[in-house]
Amino acid sequence: MNAQFPFNAPDPQNLQVLEAYRVRAAAAKATTEDFTGWLERIDVLEGLTTKDLTRIHGQLIAIGNLKFEISGRRVGLCYKISDRGRQSLEKAKTAATAAKDNDGDETAQDAAA
């Protein structure tokens, strides 16, 4: 059974971790000829504790934004942004752009009044 979760504005910390994986994947893709999309776990991210990162990884996996696989003893868990995760990032960027545009419109309307 696949659960369907409506898109609500995702937690900013979840988006921060997803974006960090997106950036890391883009860099790896640009420098690795046979890049598969799998990345080592992000263990350090500015503004987030280890406990935060553990919680966020669990949430992202639970809602289908992040996939994981076990990759041997040396690496451990590897992660990959799912299609749903990419869609979540895109929707969040679109929503942020729309909100920014609306703020600009309101400012212009306030100035005209």
Image (cartoon, helix red, strand yellow):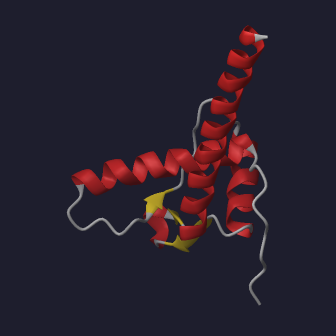
Does residue 92 lie above or below 2 as drawn? above
Does residue 76 lie above or below 95 as drawn? below
Q: Position of residue 103 (x, y in %)?
A: 71, 25
Residue at the far left in the pictured view? 33
Is 101 in front, or is 91? 101
**Residue drawn at (44%, 59%), measured in percent from left and top?**
39
Image quadrant holding the C terminus, namely top right
Q: In which quadrant of the rendered view does residue 66 lie?
A: bottom right
Q: In which quadrant of the rendered view does residue 104 lie?
A: top right
Q: Position of residue 37 (x, y in %)?
A: 40, 65
Left or right of residue 65, residue 3 in this image: right
Q: In which quadrant of the rendered view does residue 36 lie?
A: bottom left
**Residue drawn at (54%, 46%), measured in percent from left and top?**
19
Q: How many marks?
A: 0
Q: Position of residue 52 (x, y in %)?
A: 74, 43
Is 45 in front, or is 11? 11
Left or right of residue 88, residue 42 in this image: left
Residue at the far bottom in the pictured view? 1
Residue at the far front in the pictured view? 113
Image quadrant holding the N terminus, namely bottom right
Left or right of residue 46, residue 54 in this image: right
**Residue drawn at (24%, 68%), measured in percent from left and top?**
34
Does residue 85 lie above or below 15 as drawn? below
**Residue drawn at (63%, 64%), measured in percent from left and top?**
65
Q: Position of residue 94 (x, y in %)?
A: 60, 46
